Image (cartoon, helix red, strand yellow):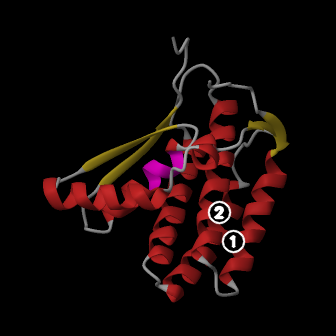
Amino acid sequence: MLIYRNSHRPERTAHLLGTLATAAATLADGEPSHDAVRDLLVAFDTLEGGIADRLNPQVDDLGPCQAALRQTALALATTFLDSLAGRRRATRCGLQRLTRQLAALEQHDLPEIIEVAQAEGYAWYALFPEAYVLAARQFQAEVAPQAAVCLGLRQIGGSLSAVVAAAIAETGCPVQLFNARPRGDPF
């Protein structure tokens, strides 16, 4: 039997953003474990989805704030790939850039309060972004696209699409990255 529940809770956007920036800066100053970088990726996904849902409750839009969020997600995904490959220096440099990008997000007109939820796919269904990196690399090797579009379906689709886009982009293939929220009755 499957039981669904509403696990959304209100959070202050500035608090979540500050927590992420502090975590990124702390990781950049040390020897970050890959698990810690993955945790940061998942936490950012929750923040990005909450902001996008609040800014666009009825219809998705790619305004300046959402574009900045997607670029930050892509930068974090690139850092995730560096971490996965064991490139420690590149990982630390990526985390330093991420710290600056997170601070720059504060310049946007962010909602004061957002609704966040636990990333169920990661928490309960054993989904790992590493598996999506492998699939993206296999796709790139087999199909060799001239360009790609990665569409993330929130909740965890935001981070998964970002790691897929980063994995494809590392081969030099241009990638566009978007995020959307399914709406309406699922049945």
Q: What residue is pinned by disc 1? A: 24
Highlighted magenta segment, given as a residue range: 158-162
Count of all numbered marks drawn on residues in the image: 2
Q: Is residue 142 magenta?
A: no
Residue behind mark 2: 40
Is residue 67 among the parts visible in the rendering?
Answer: no
* Residue occupying image coordinates x 47% and y 83%: 86
Characterize the local packing of mark 1: few (<14), some (14-19) or many (20 or more) Cα atoms within 10 angstroms.
many
The dot on residue 178 is none
User: Which image quadrant: the N terminus?
Assistant: top right
Using the image, determine if residue 3 lies above or below residue 165.
above
> Callout 2: helix, strand or loop?
helix
At x 65%, y 63%, the residue is 40
- Residue shown at 69%/47% (left/top)? 47
Three-letter residue code for mark 2? Leu
141 on left or right of 68: left
